[in-house]
Image: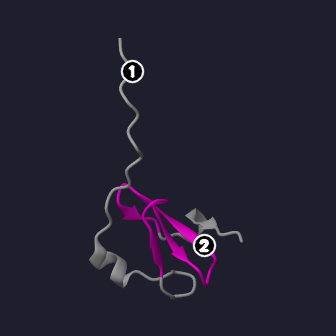
Amino acid sequence: MTDAPARPHHQPQVDPRLLEVLVCPVTHGPLEYDREAGELISRSARLAYPIRDGVPVMLPEEARELTD
């Protein structure tokens, strides 16, 4: 039995048109797409919304608080 080489973690693509219309549900401000982390970042709310299976989860209770 051989071990398969580890594959890099790959985030599913998010439709760029969707990213153009999404805003932070807390501040209604713009979001930045962090492809590597698989998150949408709201600098004004200091929150990072996860993207799961290519779908942004835009619930404040699911967001990660940003630290300095």
Tell me where residue 43 appears, x and y as whole percent. 59, 80
Q: Give the SS element for disc 1.
A: loop
Which amino acid type corresponds to the residue marked 1 in the rendered image? Answer: Asp
* Residue 52 falls within the magenta-colored stretch: yes
Q: Magenta stretch: residue 61 in it?
A: no
Q: In this view, does 31 lie above or below 3?
A: below
What is the quadrant of residue 16 in the picture? bottom left
Of 28 and 9, nearer the camera is 9
State yes or no: discs 2 and 1 in contact (Cβ < 8 Å). no
Residue for point 51% across, 80% down:
25
Which one is earlier in the sequence, the residue at label 2 or at label 1? Answer: 1
- Residue range in magenta is 31-57
Q: Whole-percent x and y of residue 58?
A: 48, 71
Q: Which residue occupies 32% across, 76% down?
A: 18
| Quarter holding residue 17 | bottom left
Considering only vertical position in the picture, is 1 above or below 55?
Answer: above
Give the alpha-carbon distance from disc 2 to disc 1, as whole Å: 38 Å
Quadrant the C terminus occupies: bottom right
Total numbered labels: 2
Q: What residue is disc 2 on?
A: 47
Marks 2, 1: nearer the viewer:
1
Horizontally, residue 24 falls left or right of residue 8, namely: right
According to the picture, the residue beneath numbered tag 1 turns out to be: 3
The amino acid on which the numbered mark 2 sits, given as a three-letter code, is Leu
Q: Residue 9 location, x and y as percent?
A: 42, 46
Q: Which residue is drawn at 45% across and 83% down?
A: 23
Q: Residue furthest right?
A: 68
Q: Which residue lies furthest to the front in this view?
A: 5
Viewer-nearest residue: 53 or 10: 10
- Looking at the picture, does residue 24 appear above or below residue 66? below
Please identify the quarter of the rendering in which residue 60 is found: bottom right
